[in-house]
Image (cartoon, rainbow, N blue to C red):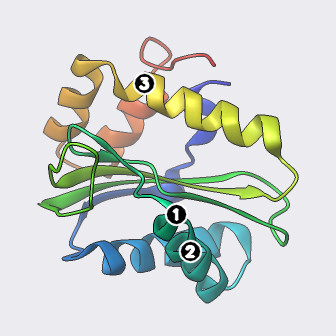
Amino acid sequence: MELKSLVRPSGVLAELKSRSKKQLLHDLADVAARESKIPQRVIFEALLQRERLGATGVGRGIAIPHCRLADADALVVVFARLATAIPFDSVDGEPVDLVFLIVAPELSGADHLKALACISRAMRDAKLVKKLRAARDKSALLAILTDTSTSTAA
């Protein structure tokens, strides 16, 4: 699995203006609902429930909130770069400005884990993270995320 295969143009957001973790999850659930045809509220509630188990802020300003849903028939990934970093209960206590949301089918065990691994591995690349933070707009973000030289196989 590669990063470029996970991200679709309609799932990339630049300069998202969410001001809290809850609002961010709500905003991301809106986009995922359009991508998946699953009601926004169902996605949002599943994300809140997952966050109660443990925050998905992985550190260095990056979060990967995710959930599995019985109604999902395909993997949906949404990427957002926030206009301003927000608190997210990250493992390092740092605010978050780069977020990948994953909504997976309930029985997608391997694909869900592969997507998480792929995104996690890609976000360990300091040069890639720096490029994402410096990108000026959605098209630049999409170009970076789908560039085969930065797309990490899982």
Counting residues from the start of the chain, the first of labels 3 and 1 encountered is 1
Q: Amino acid at mark 1?
A: Leu
Alpha carbon distance from label 3 to label 1: 24 Å
Q: Which residue is mark 2?
A: 49
Asked if residue 27 lies left or right of residue 77, the reply is: left
Packing grade of label 2 (10 A; few <14, some 14-19, many >=20) is few
Q: Position of residue 40 (x, y in %)?
A: 60, 84
Q: What is the quadrant of residue 71 in the picture? A: bottom right
Q: Quadrant of residue 130?
A: top left
Circles 2, 1 touching at the beta carbon (< 8 Å): yes
- Where is 44 relative to 57, above or below? below
Mark 3 surroundings within 10 Å by alpha-carbon count, few (fewer than 14), some (14 through 19), many (20 or more): many
Q: Amino acid at mark 2?
A: Gln
Q: Reply above or below: 146 against 94.
A: above
Q: Is residue 74 left or right of residue 97?
A: right
Q: Secondary structure at mark 3?
A: helix
Residue marked by disc 3:
122
Q: Residue beneath label 1, please? A: 53
Q: Secondary structure at mark 1?
A: helix
User: Which residue is depicted at the point 14% across and 37% down?
Assistant: 134
Which residue sits at x=23%, y=76%? 20
> Closest to the observer: 23 or 32?
23
Of the two numbered discs 3 and 2 on the same chain, state the one appearing first in sequence: 2
Q: Nearer the viewer, residue 144 or 96?
A: 96
The amino acid type of the residue labelled 3 equals Ala
- Residue 106, given in percent of the width and then of the height, sits at 82, 59
Q: Is residue 61 above or below residue 34?
A: above
Task: Please provide percent x and percent y for residue 120.
Answer: 46, 30
